[in-house]
Structure formats: structure tokens, C-alpha cells
Image: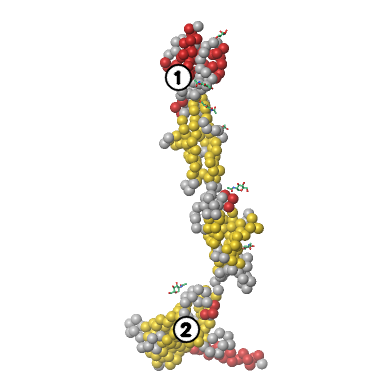
């Protein structure tokens, strides 16, 4: 019984092969075509130029799927008449020999195909002297594989920015959910896949996950997700291991080391005026002189220049106390010379204390500031008074 059933099918197969063998090159057509939903598909059915065939009429017919009996006419073309379409969404283009202008066949285009467009398409050419020629083109339209992707529009995000995260999935889901890996309990929901994170902070830096939810019919897509890392950049103020202003004495060494907390590696630059002194976070000055007093500027900048901060640091170089002592005591009773006023002006508290014990009135406690002229003035006056005793 089984054998009897299969025998006619076997014969039919041989018959088809014979036709292919005989007319294989007669008509160029797309025997098997696969497409993804949404694509435009073109099926051609063209008589080879070497065959001297006169085409009288062209037809495209969709063979009904399954057990449906009737085929569906798509389009008919007869030279001298406009193309007659039976269905929309299709476009028929006739093809003629470029030299002779003789009709050679046609190309049927189906726009934005869906799974429903899958099936067999029969192209029928009525010709002389060959008669009726039929070819069947099989088209299979598959759903695009389910996919989900995430993006955010800004290349660089810093604290305070509003960040729009876009999640898109195919086929379109019922809704999108957005979560972050730090806090899986918290999910945001959106119907169109757009999520706004307002005024982001460094705490929003995280790996985000987008989870589309399809209806329950779409089984194998559940759990499909996309992840994306979001970095919210920040650059805090600069902090140093020494506070500004810094008082140091002539001849001393100093090293100031600073750091700024940031989301990326930083490039540091110490400058005074237009002169670059250091390209690291540390400024080292050895054996300072009084003309190194002044304002220094430290800049911290992202390697890609996206964020920058700077800080001013004042250094006061004070004259050595020994210098002041010498002038005070060794030259104590000598009339003051103009050039020694500078050193008196820098005398320090220690000097003052000892000088008072000797009843030599000199600088007061608050004369440590190097640039003020108050100390020498005072000293001059009081010194004059002391020597007159
Ligand atoms: C399909 O064809 C239409 C009309 O020519 C065109 O606008 C559209 O971009 C095409 N679609 C694809 C996926 O190529
Ligand atoms: C980040 O979170 C920490 C602890 O949760 C909090 O102390 C800090 O203020 C937050 N920072 C910002 C910029 O929101
Ligand atoms: C996201 O997808 C991965 C596989 O790609 C899966 O292991 C994970 O469980 C999914 N996450 C969620 C929350 O569904
Ligand atoms: C600051 O840091 C520099 C470099 O590390 C160091 O030489 C210096 O002693 C530090 N200064 C203070 C006050 O800690
Ligand atoms: C310093 O002067 C005061 C008065 O101005 C006097 O009483 C005191 O004895 C003097 N001391 C010395 C060490 O000369
Ligand atoms: C020293 O400080 C006192 C207050 O502490 C002030 O009255 C006086 O004017 C100051 N003297 C000088 C020379 O700056
Ligand atoms: C540095 O000297 C100035 C006066 O010259 C004084 O006001 C300041 O308090 C001093 N700073 C330190 C850290 O000693």
C-alpha cells in the first residue's frame, strides 16, 4: 500500500527533472528565495536573449498555500495594454531586449514582505512558437530574529546631564523595562523604549539592562535583553597635602602634592604665570629664593579635555631667621644702613623675644610678613630710642 502511494510521486519528480533539463536555460528565474520581513523582494522571469521567442502575454500568479484550491492572480501584461494588477503591494516591470526592443520577460517586486507573502509564485509566459511556459518561484519570508539594542545619544556624560537611554527591540514588544545591576529591584517601564535619567550623578554610573516584554505567544524571546554601561563623569576640586598660603624660608625645599577625585585619569600641570613648572601632581621647589614667592596654578584635566578644574596656590618665601638675627644682634648698636632694613623687616618672633630681653626694642611680633615695610619703620624708630638710652 505504501509503495503504491509513493510511486506516482516518484514519477512526478522525474518528470519535473526532465523539464528542468530541457528548458533549464530557457527562462532565468529565482527558484528559491528567502527574505526577512520588511524587505522588498524581486522575482524575475526572463527568457534568455538567445531564444527567438515572441511573448504574447505575461502573468504572475500566487499559488495558494495549504489546501486552498484557487490560485490568486497578481498581474497580467499584454503588449500594447497597461499592466493589469489584481492585488496591491506588487509592482511589475517588463524587460525588453536592449537592442531589438523585443519583450523578454518581467520582474515582479513585492514591497515590505510579511510571512503571509511566503509561497509559490508562478510566472506564466504565453509565447510563440513555444506556447505556454510556466516557472514556479518559491519565496520564504521569515520573521527577523528577535533583537534588542540600547543606546544613549551623548558621547560624553557628566554629572548634571539628563541622559536619555533608548531601547529598541524587534519585533515590537508590549513594553520595555530598564533596570540597573546595582539595584535589580528597581525597574523603570516605558512603552516606546525611551527612558530619561534626569540630572545624573556619579551614583548613576552602572551597567543598565533593557528587558523588552513581548506577549506570551512569543515564547523564545522572553528574557532577551541588552546591557549597556553608563559612565557619568565627574571631576572634584583639587586637594593638596599642604594648605595655601604656604610660608617657607629662603633656602628650604618644598614639595606640594595635590589630587583631584575624578572618573577618569587626569593630566596635571603646575604653572606660574606662563611658565610650566611640572607636568605631574607634585610641585617640587628646591632651595627657594624670595623671588619664588607668588601664586602658582595647578590645572587638572581629563586626558580627552572634556572636563577641567584648576586651583591657585600661594607660596610666601620668608627670609631666614638667622639672617635677621645677625643683623639684629651683631650689628645691633651700629647705625642702621639702608640695605639692612630689608632683613629687619623679616625678623621673626624669636628675634623679637630675645631683643626685648636686651632692652633693644626691635620688630614686633607681627612683622613676619616679608613684603611689608612696617617692621623696618618700627625698628628704625625704636632702635633710635634704644640707642639713646
Ligand atoms: C522598498 O522599496 C521602497 C520603494 O522603492 C523603498 O522606499 C524602501 O526603502 C524599500 N525598502 C527596503 C527595505 O529596501
Ligand atoms: C552617592 O551615594 C552616596 C551613598 O549612597 C551618597 O553619600 C552621595 O551623596 C551620592 N552622591 C551623589 C553625587 O549623589
Ligand atoms: C539577559 O540575557 C542573558 C543571556 O543573554 C541571560 O542569561 C540573563 O538571564 C538575561 N537577564 C534577564 C534579567 O532576563
Ligand atoms: C606632600 O607630598 C610630597 C610628595 O609626596 C611630600 O614630599 C611632602 O612632604 C608632602 N607634604 C606634606 C606636608 O605632607
Ligand atoms: C629694661 O628697661 C626697663 C625699663 O624700660 C628696666 O626696668 C629694665 O631694668 C631694663 N632691663 C635691662 C636688662 O636692662
Ligand atoms: C601688630 O598687631 C597688632 C594687633 O595684633 C596691631 O595693633 C599692630 O598694629 C600690628 N603692628 C604692625 C607693625 O603691623
Ligand atoms: C604665613 O604668613 C602670613 C603673614 O606673613 C600669616 O598671616 C599666615 O598665617 C602664615 N601662614 C602659616 C601657615 O604660617
Mark 2 residue's CB less than 8 Å from ligand 1: no
Q: From this viewpoint, is residue 92 visible?
A: yes
Element on which disc 1 rests: helix
Q: On the rendered image, what quadrant is the N terminus found in?
A: bottom right
- The CA distance from mark 1 to mark 2 is 105 Å
Q: From this viewpoint, is residue 323 visible?
A: no
Q: Residue at x 46, y 25 (%)?
A: 290
Q: Residue at x 47, y 79 (%)?
A: 89
The mark nearer the N terminus, 1 or 2, is 2
Q: Which residue is mark 2?
A: 87
Classed neighbour count for the residue bearing mark 2: other residues with Cα under 10 Å, few (<14), some (14–19), many (≥20)? few
Q: Is residue 172 left or right of residue 85?
A: right
Give x and y (percent) for residue 67.
58, 87
- Which quarter holds ligand 3? bottom right
Give x and y (percent) for residue 302.
50, 46
Mark 1 residue's CB less than 8 Å from ligand 7: no
Q: Nearer the viewer, residue 143 or 46?
A: 143
Give x and y (percent) for residue 310.
49, 40
Q: Is residue 277 above or below residue 328?
A: below
Q: Nearer the viewer, residue 99 or 303?
A: 303
Q: Which label was assigned to residue 136?
A: none
Q: Residue at x 43, y 92 (%)?
A: 131
Q: Is residue 133 left or right of residue 232?
A: left
Q: Which residue is mark 1?
A: 342
Colour logic: secondary structure
Amino acid at each position: 500500500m505504501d509503495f503504491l502511494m509513493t510511486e506516482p510521486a516518484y514519477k512526478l519528480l522525474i518528470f519535473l527533472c526532465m523539464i528542468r533539463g530541457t528548458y533549464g536555460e530557457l527562462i532565468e528565474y529565482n527558484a528559491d528565495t528567502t527574505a526577512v520581513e520588511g524587505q522588498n523582494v524581486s522575482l524575475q522571469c526572463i527568457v534568455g536573449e538567445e531564444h527567438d521567442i515572441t511573448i504574447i502575454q505575461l502573468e504572475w500568479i500566487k499559488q495558494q498555500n495549504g489546501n486552498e484550491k484557487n490560485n490568486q492572480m497578481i498581474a497580467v501584461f499584454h503588449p500594447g495594454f497597461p499592466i493589469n494588477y489584481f492585488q496591491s503591494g506588487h509592482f511589475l516591470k517588463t524587460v525588453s531586449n536592449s537592442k531589438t526592443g523585443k519583450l523578454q520577460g518581467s520582474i515582479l517586486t513585492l514591497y515590505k514582505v510579511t510571512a503571509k507573502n511566503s509561497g509559490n509564485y508562478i510566472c506564466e509566459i504565453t509565447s510563440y512558437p513555444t506556447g505556454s511556459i510556466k516557472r514556479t518561484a518559491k519565496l520564504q519570508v521569515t520573521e527577523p530574529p528577535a533583537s534588542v539594542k540600547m543606546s544613549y545619544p551623548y558621547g560624553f556624560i557628566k554629572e548634571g546631564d539628563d541622559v536619555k537611554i533608548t531601547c529598541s527591540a524587534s519585533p515590537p514588544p508590549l513594553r520595555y523595562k530598564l533596570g540597573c545591576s546595582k539595584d535589580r529591584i528597581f525597574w523603570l517601564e516605558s512603552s516606546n523604549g525611551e527612558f530619561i535619567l534626569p540630572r545624573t550623578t556619579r551614583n548613576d554610573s552602572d551597567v543598565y539592562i533593557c528587558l523588552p516584554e513581548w506577549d506570551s505567544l512569543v515564547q523564545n524571546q522572553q528574557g532577551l535583553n541588552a546591557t549597556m554601561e553608563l559612565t557619568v563623569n565627574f571631576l572634584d576640586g583639587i586637594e593638596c597635602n599642604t594648605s595655601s598660603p604656604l610660608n617657607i624660608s629662603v633656602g628650604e625645599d618644598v614639595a606640594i602634592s595635590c589630587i583631584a577625585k575624578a572618573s577618569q585619569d587626569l593630566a596635571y600641570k603646575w604653572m606660574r604665570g606662563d611658565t610650566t613648572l611640572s607636568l605631574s601632581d607634585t610641585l617640587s621647589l628646591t632651595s627657594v629664593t624670595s623671588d619664588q614667592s607668588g601664586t602658582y596654578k595647578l590645572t587638572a584635566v581629563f586626558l580627552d579635555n572634556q572636563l577641567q578644574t584648576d586651583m591657585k596656590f600661594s607660596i610666601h618665601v620668608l627670609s631666614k631667621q638667622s639672617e635677621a638675627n645677625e643683623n639684629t644682634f651683631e650689628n645691633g648698636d651700629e647705625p642702621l644702613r639702608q640695605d639692612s632694613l630689608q632683613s629687619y623687616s623679616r625678623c621673626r618672633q624669636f628675634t623679637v623675644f630675645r631683643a626685648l630681653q636686651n632692652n633693644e626694642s626691635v620688630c614686633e611680633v607681627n612683622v613676619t610678613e616679608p613684603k611689608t615695610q612696617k617692621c623696618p619703620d618700627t625698628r628704625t624708630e625704636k632702635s633710635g630710642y634704644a640707642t639713646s638710652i
